Image (cartoon, rainbow, N blue to C red):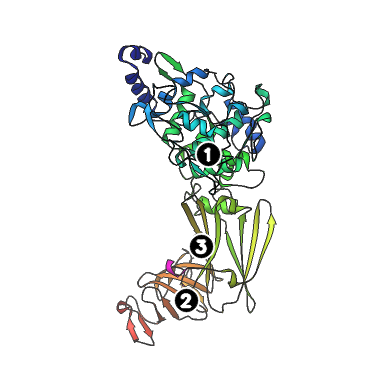
């Protein structure tokens, strides 16, 4: 039985429930919907996306008297709809007494109800009439706290003399509707060029405020209700014996990254721009390994770290994000690259140091006063930061911590040169030729063979696992006693991590009962550590 036949027999409420159930599930765009826009940025991307979403069917302004009963249905009660700005759940049949049609892009700025833009489902929402009147054609913006007033019948929404601020639950939805209208309607459509800027001008169909709308778009990503709404506008739905199918999508709902890829890519490489530049629409839709903590190419560098230096997250190359240069008697230079204008994306870069790098609690942030000098050189599209510290005189490790904050959520990742880019080939100057197996003698570590580096077989101490970037300063995991630190200056004295004591590493003892020595305890067996 067709849905519209079922509607006539069982009534609108039952029909609505069926339409919902048929639509709920998959909200992704068709596989090839955005194919031609892949890897484009800025104006080129905007033009291509416009070509993808234009020529939709105009269902007429009156259709929005009925469509909200499916598009904006209360998921907990199929007989009601949820109003924008207030979140009120009311009976959907009470139009226009209890609700009317809100134009997120005002009619006086080009979205006239008698024209195609004014009837576009993507920017029309059900609203309380009083709230709708209060918002009028004011631009969306953060309210001035000194003059903001609560909006009657819309808890959480405020208004001041020159702007309207929706409640948090609707900020992202409104932002994406406005971004869509800017993208969808341009001069070639015959309705004028709809433009988002920092100021509004009704005669030129220019609305504000782009920077704030982009901020809301990032802070409040699409929820399931918005994803479902976008999908139904594109795929269509039956209700009351009629089919409603506008036939196009809001790209900013499908791929939030597109907003920065279009509107900010000429100024900086934001997180969204970077993701759209390196991942295909299909990869972003699937989402596996494309988030901040994902490692798409499995190179031990998570995406947030690769973004921090504008690297390719798909090339499988584990580059060193932090390098250090030691000048004995002078100091240490630390160098890393960062995205320009990173503060606009909530990205922070912090250098940390530790004397015992395998103990997380020992890492501390290097402060401004720790540096003798900091030099920033511009390179497009990153900045190379060179920081110089005084020579500490003792072995010390450094790492780069990158964090990205959006609203109250923060993702962080650490690049540790020791654990992230530990070389697969031996760091020692006496490295074997590949394929040979022969004992080598280190001037300070005795006899060993390093063909299986970083696992090294030591003649006196069995298997040890190296963690190092220099051949004279190493952390290693002794198969019997755990993690140990040593260097050419201290060996055969070793620092034992778990017991927090210095040990004398006896070379002449036999396995498995080796002897060790400390000033406090004298000689003892490794089993007594």
Q: Residues within 10 Å of mark 2 (few under 14, many from 20)?
A: many
User: Could you say which quadrant of the image residue 348 lies in?
Assistant: bottom right
- The x and y percentages for residue 22 are 37, 24
Point out the stretch of residues depicted in magenta.
354-363
Which of pointers 2 and 1 indicates the residue nearer the eye? Answer: 1
Magenta-span inclusion, residue 473: no
Contact? badges 3 and 2 (CB < 8 Å): no
Residue at 41% across, 24% down? 70
Query: In terms of sequence position, does the residue under pointer 2 or pointer 1 come before the other?
Result: 1
Q: Residues within 10 Å of mark 1 (few under 14, many from 20)?
A: some
* Residue topped by disc 3: 416
Q: Residues within 10 Å of mark 3 (few under 14, many from 20)?
A: some
* Residue topped by disc 1: 256
- Residue 144 is left or right of residue 23, and the answer is right
Q: Name the residue nearer the viewer: 467 or 276.
A: 276
- Residue 410 is left or right of residue 330, and the answer is left
**Above or below, comparing residue 511 to residue 284 in the picture:** below
Q: Which mark is residue 277?
A: none
The image quadrant where one finds the N terminus is top left
- Residue 195 is left or right of residue 303, and the answer is right
* Residue topped by disc 2: 486
Magenta-span inclusion, residue 361: yes
Q: Name the residue nearer the viewer: 59 or 232.
A: 59
Q: Main secondary structure of the magenta part?
A: loop
Q: Secondary structure at mark 2?
A: strand
The image quadrant where one finds the C terminus is bottom left
Query: In terms of sequence position, does the residue under pointer 1 or pointer 3 come before the other?
Result: 1
- The x and y percentages for residue 379 are 69, 54
Query: In terms of sequence position, does the residue under pointer 3 or pointer 2 come before the other?
Result: 3
């Amino acid at each position: 039985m067709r849905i519209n036949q079922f509607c006539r027999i069982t009534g609108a409420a039952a029909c609505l429930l069926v339409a919902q159930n048929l639509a709920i599930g998959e909200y992704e765009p068709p596989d090839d919907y955005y194919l031609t826009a892949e890897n484009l940025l800025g104006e080129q991307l905007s033009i291509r996306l416009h070509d993808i979403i234009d020529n939709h069917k105009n269902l007429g302004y009156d259709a929005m008297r009925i469509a909200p009963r499916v598009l904006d249905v209360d998921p907990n009660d199929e007989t009601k709809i949820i109003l924008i700005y207030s979140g009120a759940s009311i009976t959907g049949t009470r139009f226009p007494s209890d609700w009317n049609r809100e134009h997120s892009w005002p009619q006086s700025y080009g979205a006239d109800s008698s024209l195609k833009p004014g009837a576009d489902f993507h920017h029309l929402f059900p609203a309380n009439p009083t709230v709708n009147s209060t918002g009028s054609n004011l631009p969306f913006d953060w309210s001035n706290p000194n003059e903001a007033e609560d909006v009657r019948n819309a808890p959480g929404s405020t208004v001041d003399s020159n702007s309207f601020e929706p409640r948090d639950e609707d900020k992202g939805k409104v932002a994406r509707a406005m971004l869509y209208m800017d993208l969808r309607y341009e001069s070639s459509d015959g309705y004028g060029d709809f433009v988002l800027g920092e100021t509004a001008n009704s005669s030129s169909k220019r609305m504000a405020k782009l920077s704030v709308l982009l901020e809301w778009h990032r802070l409040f990503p699409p929820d399931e209700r918005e994803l479902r709404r976008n999908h139904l506008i594109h795929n269509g739905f039956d209700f009351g014996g009629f089919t409603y199918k506008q036939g196009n999508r809001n790209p900013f709902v499908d791929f939030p990254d597109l907003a920065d890829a279009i509107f900010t890519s000429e100024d900086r490489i934001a997180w969204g721009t970077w993701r759209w530049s390196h991942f295909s629409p299909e990869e972003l839709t699937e989402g596996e390994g494309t988030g901040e903590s994902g490692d798409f190419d499995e190179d031990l560098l998570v995406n947030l770290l690769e973004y921090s230096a504008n690297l390719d997250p798909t090339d499988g190359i584990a580059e060193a994000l932090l390098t250090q240069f030691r000048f004995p008697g002078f100091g240490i230079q630390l160098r890393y690259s960062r995205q320009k204008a990173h503060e606009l994306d909530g990205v922070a870069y912090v250098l940390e140091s530790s004397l015992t790098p395998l103990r997380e609690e020992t890492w501390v942030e290097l402060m401004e006063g720790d540096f003798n000098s900091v030099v920033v050189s511009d390179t497009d599209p990153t900045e190379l930061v060179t920081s110089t510290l005084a020579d500490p005189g003792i072995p010390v490790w450094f790492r780069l911590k990158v964090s990205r904050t959006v609203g109250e959520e923060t993702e962080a990742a650490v690049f540790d040169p020791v654990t992230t880019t530990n070389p697969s080939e031996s760091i020692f100057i006496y490295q074997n030729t590949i394929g040979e197996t022969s004992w080598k003698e280190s001037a300070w570590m005795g006899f060993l063979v390093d063909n299986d580096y970083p696992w090294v077989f030591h003649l006196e101490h069995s298997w040890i696992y190296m963690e190092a970037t220099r051949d004279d300063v190493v952390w290693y995991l002794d198969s019997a006693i755990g993690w140990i630190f040593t260097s050419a200056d201290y060996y055969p004295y070793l620092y034992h991590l778990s017991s927090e004591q210095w040990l004398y590493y006896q070379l002449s003892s036999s396995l498995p009962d080796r002897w060790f020595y400390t000033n406090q305890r004298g000689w003892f067996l490794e089993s007594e550590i």
